[in-house]
Amino acid sequence: MTQEVAQLNPTAKEQIGDYEIDLIELFYRLIENVKYIIAAALVGALLSWLYTATMVDPLYTATSKLYVLNAGDSAINLADLQIGNYLASDYQEVFKNWHVHEMVIDRLELPYSYTEISKMITVSNPTNTRILYIKATAKSPEEAKNIADTYASVAQEFIATTMDTREPNLFEEALLPSAPSSPNLSRNLIIGFMLGFIAACGAITVIYLMDDKIHSSEDVEKYIGIPTLGMLPMQDDRHNAVRQRKGGVSA
């Protein structure tokens, strides 16, 4: 049959070999399967919810704050403010000292190593301020608050004795967290929904690209290069058998 096609249309082989992706046809194929795409997206969101609810432990974050001082007198000038900003940056290094971590572990009798507890602490200094934010993340709200407050207290003592400077003031104690800070259920649901959506679209696209069957007269002219003169409806064997029985009864 390939030889006959080649004889009828010399460029048929070239047209078959030069396969092009019809983006419009692909778009309509996706529209036709939109119910499966939505179903896959909902399944992805459901799986994400189940994973978040059953496999991920909630974490709580508490924040205590220290106010960095420069001089003992009450007069504050521009130089004091600049030096205070530099000190705030220096004081962040205090929370990387393993002695500080060990002091917190001993006071609270925590079952963590200093490496583990160091990953539970985040210290930041907002721009143009002399306030240190000490954020502690733990599996219970009470533990998160205790760790944040203890780090603030230990840092005050460590800075005064080790750095030979005035200790920072406690600007704000940590509040007891009322809700977990992670996992973010809404974000995970959106991610699961999008992953299911993308997976379904990808599967439909792959099936479309691998489908080399001829489905319509347009496909015949497109891939083989032969115009269609007419079409005959297909009938299955059961329909033919019924017609033969009817013909025999009539006879």
Image (cartoon, rainbow, N blue to C red):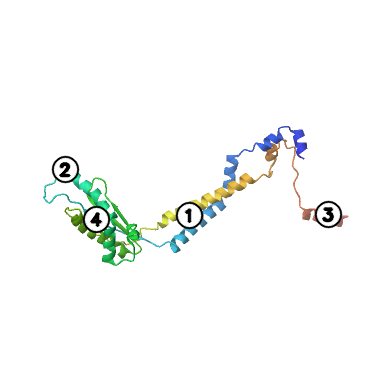
Q: Nearer the viewer, residue 167 or 185?
A: 167
Please tell me in which quadrant of the rendered image residue 227 appears. Answer: top right
Amino acid type, label 2: Ala
Q: In the picture, which quadrant includes the N terminus?
A: top right
Amino acid type, label 1: Gly
Amino acid type, label 3: Gln
Q: Can residue 90 be seen here?
A: yes
| Disc nearest the viewer among 2 and 4 | 2
Q: Residue at x 14, y 49 (%)?
A: 71
Whichever of callouts 2 and 4 sits on the residue coming sooner in the sequence is: 4
Gap between marks 2 and 1 measured at Cα: 52 Å
Q: Is residue 114 above or below residue 25?
A: below
Residue on which the image places disc 3:
244
Does residue 10 appear left or right of residue 61 in this picture? right
Q: Secondary structure at mark 2?
A: helix
Residue on which the image places disc 2:
79
Q: Secondary structure at mark 3?
A: helix
Gap between marks 4 and 1 measured at Cα: 36 Å
Residue on which the image places disc 4:
65
- Give me the disc on residue 63: none
